[in-house]
Amino acid sequence: MKKIEILISGFGGQGIMSLGKFLAKAALSEGNQVTYFPSYGAEMRGGTAHCCVKISDLPIASPFEDNPDVALLLNQPSLDKFKNKLKKGGVLILNSDLISDKFIFGNIKGISLPLSKIAFECGNVKVANIVALGALISLDPSIFKKETLIKGIKGTFRDQNILKQNLLALDKGQALASKK
C-alpha cells in the first residue's frame, strides 16, 4: 500500500500552492488517489502559506495532514511552525537561504540547500520550489518517477525559457541532494 503526506510551506510568491497542485496532478497521472489542501493562514503579510498533498493507492478519508512523511520548508517561519510535525524517518528539505536556524535532523532524512541561490543560478528565483522537488526525488525516488515530473513540467510551461529554467532546477536539485 502506498500512502504519503507531503507538506509544502513558505512565503506567498514562492510557488507553494503551485507546487502542491503540480504534485497532485503528477500523482493523479500515475494512477493514485490524491487530495490537495491549501492553507493561506490568517497573516496578512510575512506569514506562512502551506499546503498538504496526500497520495495513496486507496481512497483518502481526510485532506488534513497529521504528521507528514515529507516536508519542503522554504522559510524560517515555516520551520518554526512545522518542525515538530514531521514523522520519524520522514524526509525534510530546507531552504538554507531563508532559514537561519541550524536544524538537527536526528531521525529525519533531510537536507538543507541554498534553494533560492540555486534557483537564481537557473535564471529565475521563482524555481526554488522545483529545486526542492529535485532534491526530494534524490532523497526518496519512490515517491515520484522523474519522467512523470518532467512530463508535467513540459505540460505546464509553454514559454521555452521558463520551461528550460524549471527543467534545469529539477536536475540541479536532484544532483546537489545526491552529493550530500
Image (cartoon, helix red, strand yellow):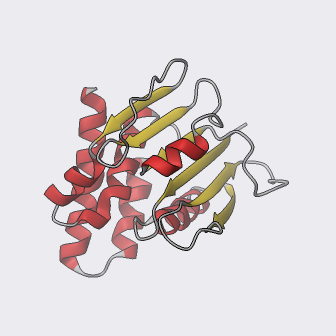
| Residue at the image position 44 percent from the left and 56 percent from the top | 148
Exactly how many numbered labels are in the figure?
A: 0
Pinpoint residue 88: horizontal percent, then vertical percent: 63, 24
The reply to whether residue 96 is in sight is yes
Q: Is residue 118 above or below residue 123?
A: above
| Residue at the image position 29 percent from the left and 49 percent from the top | 115
The reply to whether residue 144 is in sight is no
Pinpoint residue 136: horizontal percent, then vertical percent: 42, 41
Residue 28, by quadrant, is bottom right
**Furthest-top residue in view?**
106
| Residue at the image position 25 percent from the left and 81 percent from the top | 159
Pinpoint residue 35: horizontal percent, then vertical percent: 70, 61
Q: Is residue 142 above or below residue 57?
A: above
Is 17 on the left-hand or right-hand side of 62?
Answer: left
Pinpoint residue 139: horizontal percent, then vertical percent: 41, 33
Quarter of the C terminus within the rendering = top left
Choose between 165 and 100: the one closer to the eye: 100
Is 177 on the left-hand or right-hand side of 68?
Answer: left
| Residue at the image position 81 percent from the left and 54 percent from the top | 59
Is 180 on the left-hand or right-hand side of 55?
Answer: left
